């Protein structure tokens, strides 16, 4: 409201930055910008760590190295952090605006996690690890291929294709493997 009162023609996406730069003393402007950068860096390091740890512990360990030591887990996590960072830098050049990148990453997350999480919580039928894994893999892969390889044919957003495919793969995947409930009871 203050930005609108002081600068009537201001664009909403630059209002806070304009107010800080033009109305705070230089020291407070610098402090404010440093605090924003600290929040961004903290969030990004958390995302890197969560993603890399997930890849090391939930993919490499059960599939390829069940006897992984703590030191090896740390090394794999570090390796995957570099990989995730490189992917992030590569993806940064694929979008014209930050909003486009945020929308893509949001749809990537939804297409990867929505069906397996809700399916795990509410699906009354048979539930297997394969169903959840296929739903995540197909949702993520379809989103990436639709966005970057096919370039959104017909202007259709990736989420409209990937989410239904994720659900179909969840259903198909749940016919394969041992039911989680029977495994937990054993």
Image: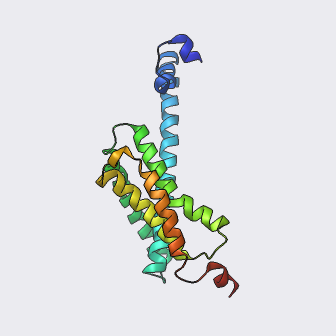
| Count of numbered tags | 0
Q: Position of residue 101 (x, y in %)?
A: 41, 44
Residue furthest to the right in view is 185
Q: Nearer the viewer, residue 165 or 88?
A: 165
- Colour scheme of the picture: rainbow
Q: Who's the residue at 52% across and 29% down the image?
A: 32
Q: Position of residue 184 (x, y in %)?
A: 67, 82
Q: Nearer the viewer, residue 7 or 68?
A: 7
Which quadrant does the C terminus fall into? bottom right
Q: Position of residue 34 (x, y in %)?
A: 49, 34
Image vertical order of residue 23 relative to residue 181, above or below: above
Which quadrant does the N terminus fall into? top right
| Residue 53 seen in the current view | no
Q: Nearer the viewer, residue 139 or 74?
A: 139
Q: Nearer the viewer, residue 150 or 45?
A: 150
Image vertical order of residue 138 relative to residue 18, above or below: below
| Residue 79 seen in the current view | yes
Apparent side of residue 109 relative to residue 92 in the rendered image (left or right): right
Apparent side of residue 143 relative to residue 1 in the rendered image (left or right): left
Q: Position of residue 20 (x, y in %)?
A: 51, 22
Residue furthest to the front in view is 154
Q: Who's the residue at 45% across and 44% down the image?
A: 103
């Amino acid at each position: 409201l203050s930005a609108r009162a002081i600068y009537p023609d201001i664009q909403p996406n630059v209002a806070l930055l304009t107010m800080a730069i033009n109305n705070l003393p230089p020291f407070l402007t610098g402090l404010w910008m440093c605090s924003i950068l600290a929040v961004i860096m903290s969030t990004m390091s958390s995302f890197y760590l969560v993603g890399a740890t997930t890849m090391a512990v939930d993919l490499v360990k059960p599939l390829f190295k069940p006897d992984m030591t703590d030191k090896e887990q740390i090394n794999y996590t570090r390796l995957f952090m570099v990989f995730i960072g490189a992917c992030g830098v590569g993806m940064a050049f694929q979008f014209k605006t930050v909003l486009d990148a945020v929308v893509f990453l949001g749809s990537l997350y939804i297409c990867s996690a929505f069906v397996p999480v809700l399916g795990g919580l509410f699906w009354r039928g048979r539930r297997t690890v394969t169903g959840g894994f296929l739903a995540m893999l197909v949702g993520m892969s379809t989103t990436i291929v639709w966005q970057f390889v096919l370039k959104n044919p017909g202007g259709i957003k990736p989420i409209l294709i990937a989410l239904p495919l994720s659900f179909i793969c969840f259903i198909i995947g749940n016919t394969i493997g041992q039911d989680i409930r029977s495994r937990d009871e054993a």
